[in-house]
Structures are given as C-alpha cells and as structure tokens.
Amino acid sequence: GENVEQHPSTLSVQEGDSAVIKCTYSDSASNYFPWYKQELGKRPQLIIDIRSNVGEKKDQRIAVTLNKTAKHFSLHITETQPEDSAVYFCAAPGRDGNEKLTFGTGTRLTIIP
Amino acid sequence: DTAVSQTPKYLVTQMGNDKSIKCEQNLGHDTMYWYKQDSKKFLKIMFSYNNKELIINETVPNRFSPKSPDKAHLNLHINSLELGDSAVYFCASSSIGGSSTDTQYFGPGTRLTVL
C-alpha cells in the first residue's frame, strides 16, 4: 500500500513569513494529493488539492507543488497569519485497489505574532 | 444544516463496556468512512462503506463493527472497550462511489475516553 511521509512534524514561523511542509509518497500510480487543515479541537478540512496532471496549484496565500518524478509534494503558505496555526495533513491514495487515502503524520504549524 | 454530523461528541466509559457512535451525512454522498485519530494526531482509516456495502476494512480488532443502514448513515459499535481505544473517532463522507480522489468531508469527531 501507499506510504506517506511528512516533514517537519512541528514548524514555528514569524507572522508574515512563509511556511513550507513537505510530503513524499511511495506509490508512483498515486494521482491525487490533498492537504487538510485541522484546527485545535476541530475536524480536518480540505484546504487545497492537486492532481497529477499539473505541477502547481495556487489559491490565494496557499499553494501546492508536485514533483511526480521525485514522488514528493509540498504545501506553501505565504504571508502567514495567526489563524494559520493548526495541524496540516497531506494524503495520497495509492493504487492498492481498495481506494483509501493514506494520511501523513501531520505538521503542527505555529505562527508567532 | 451540518453536512456530516456525529453523536455523541464526547463519550466517557469504563473498560469492558459496549458503546456506539452514530454518523449521518446530508450531502447525498455514496461513500462514508470511519477514522481513528490517536493522541499523537495520527489519522488512520478504519472502515469505508459505499452505498451500504463495506469496501475498506483495515486491520481493526473485530470488537469494532460498523453498520450502514442506508447510505446516509454509518454507525460504529465497539464491544469490550479497552484503554487503547481512547481516541477521537471521525466520520467522513465523499461523493463518488469508492474513489479516494474525491474530497472527504469530516464530521466533528467523537472523543472517546476509556477509564
């Protein structure tokens, strides 16, 4: 099945600076890469996703890049704000036939005012 | 108007008891999931149902039994609760049958504490 590794596990950045979270995956057939944000005590919510036919996707201050050759994808948050503080999860589906998402281990992002 | 709802939000119980968690979605989705999130925040899939049919069954003790009476509901029954079952359990749903490339919408979670 799919193996997803996520780094770093914790990240602190000054408000206004950029944050980057990286994930690698093992299954070259994976074709969909979502990112979820989970605020303290809340549910995970999709913030952006990318499919394998594009290398980058942007939505205001967040962007995701995908390198299929290297099998890694990254979340970029620019001009960080206090409300960006949360745990972020990457995920990938794999092709093991049972159609499940495998989540990374999460990155706790703290924005320092 | 909540899209995916779960009850109860909190559940505190003694070891050895049996408990159920209920999930409902009003999004018209075909597929529903149960995830377990442990104290380290790891999010692991447990089960998935598509149109009332079990399609994913991870390596979960058979004390856990999901039931889907219709495609809008997926319940989780846990027998003989153990300390290690303490976690937050999230229900989720997605639109197209069984495809992991569809956005999953999560419920608010049920925090289970086993004493």
Image (cartoon, helix red, strand yellow):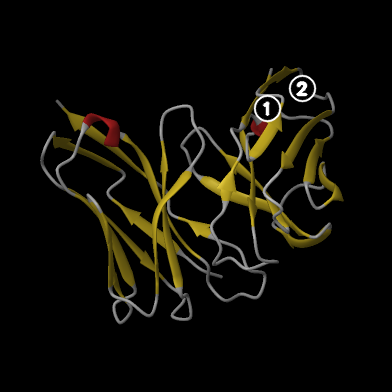
Residue at image location 53% in from the left, 67% down from the top: A93
Residue A22 occupies quadrant: bottom left
* For residue A33, side relative to residue B56 (left or right): left
Residue at image location 70% in from the left, 43% down from the top: B25
The label on residue B34 is none
The x and y percentages for residue A38 are 43, 38
Give the answer, above or below, for where A104 lies relative to B81.
Answer: below
Q: Which quadrant is the N terminus of chain B positioned in? A: top right
Residue at image location 34% in from the left, 74% down from the top: A71
Write down the residue under mark 1: B83
Give the answer, above or below, for where A49 lies relative to A27.
Answer: above
In depth, the one of A99 and B83 nearer the eye is A99
The x and y percentages for residue B39 are 50, 32
Q: How dense is the environment of label 2, judged by Cα within 10 Å: few (below 14), some, or many (20 and up)?
A: some
Q: Which quadrant is the C terminus of chain B positioned in? A: top right
Write down the residue under mark 2: B15
Closer to the N terminus: mark 2 or mark 1?
A: 2
In depth, the one of A59 and B14 nearer the eye is A59
In depth, the one of B53 and A71 nearer the eye is B53
Residue B52 occupies quadrant: bottom right
Q: How dense is the environment of label 1, judged by Cα within 10 Å: few (below 14), some, or many (20 and up)?
A: some
Q: Are marks 2 and 1 in contact (CB under 8 Å)?
A: yes
Which chain letter matches label 1?
B
The x and y percentages for residue B58 are 69, 57
SS at badge 1: helix
